[in-house]
Every structure is written in structure tokens, then in C-alpha cells.
Image: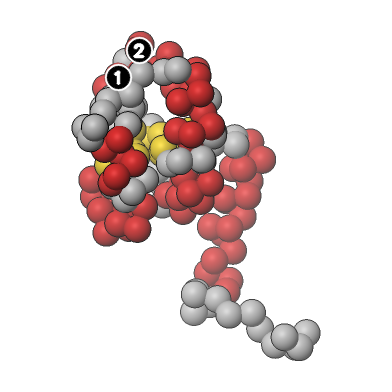
Amino acid sequence: MDSDEEWPCFYSDVDEARPDVAHYFNELSRNNHFVTAEDLSDALLENPEGIFLLDIREEEYYEREHIEGAVHIWWHDVGDRLEELPKDKPIVVVCNTGQSAAQLVGVLQSLGYRIYSLLGGMNNGWLPEGYPVITIQE
């Protein structure tokens, strides 16, 4: 791109995006929006109804093993199912490695959700620590 060309943007007015973007980056500097497997396990033991667990992995992975109480909404479908997400309690997003969850956290945070990503996801966070899982599929 030439330096005079504008970068494509999904906002019709770039200025419209700036407050949301500034808020997002300010929040990142204050709170990284990650929760460790240990902290999540402790919170679930203390008050399992106090956290909404959102598992965004593909259905086969969810059925193979998931955290008890997790609601499965594949990450491609989350935007169409926002009405199922509570705004009155924290949401912890679970994926395989934490990358997809962290991306979703940024979007949902800008929509007003109190949202966190499981650090390391299932593969590098929850499972290696030996925390319990529910299995639907053998």
C-alpha cells in the first residue's frame, strides 16, 4: 500500500472505532484477562454457579473432555448466540490452547462482558494439571 492509501476498516468512520480501541488497550494494561487452571478450579469449588464457563472448541473436543458445567458454543457461533451469555457474572472462555479464547475475550470485553481466558486452554492449562473432566464420547 502506498503511504497515502487508507487501510481497510470495517467501521464506516474510523473515529467511531477509537473509543472502543482505546478502552480495550487501557483494560489490557490493567488486567490481562487470563485465569490460571488453579484459580479457575478453586473458584469452581468455592462457587460453581458464580462463573459461566464457555467452551468454544469444536464439538468433538468438547465431547471428548470438558470442564464440568461448561456450556458448549463453538467459536464460529458465539456471535449468533450472544443472548445466551450472562452479563451478571464472569465468563471464562475455554479453547484448546488459549489463543482463540484470548481473541474472543477482546471482542466480548468491548461489548461489556466480564470475560477471561483460561491460560493455556485445555491442552496446556487444565489437562496437564490433572484437573477433572467430563467425558461424553468414548
Residue that badge 1 annotates: 48
Residue 89 in view, yes or no: no
The residue lying at 50 percent from left, 74 percent from top is 11
Please provide percent x and percent y for residue 29: 66, 40
Residues at badges 1 and 2 in contact (C-beta under 8 Å)? yes
Q: Which residue lies furthest to the front in this view?
A: 138
For label 1, the crowd category at 10 Å Cα-Cα, with few meaning under 14, some 14 to 19 and many 20 or more, is: some
The residue lying at 59 percent from left, 35 percent from top is 31
Please provide percent x and percent y for residue 105: 47, 46
Above or below, 128 against 137 in this view is: above
Amino acid residing under circle 2: Leu
Q: Is residue 97 left or right of residue 7?
A: left
Q: In this view, does 117 lie to the left or right of 64?
A: right
Residue that badge 2 annotates: 45
The residue lying at 52 percent from left, 69 percent from top is 16
Secondary element under disc 2, as helix, strand or loop, is helix
Please provide percent x and percent y for residue 103: 51, 51
Indicate the colouring scheme: secondary structure
Above or below, 11 against 118 in this view is: below
Please provide percent x and percent y for residue 102: 52, 45
Q: In this view, does 3 lie to the left or right of 51?
A: right
**In what quadrant of the picture does the C terminus appear?**
top left
Q: Of residues 35 and 62, which is closer to you in this image? A: 62
Q: Which residue lies furthest to the right in this view?
A: 3
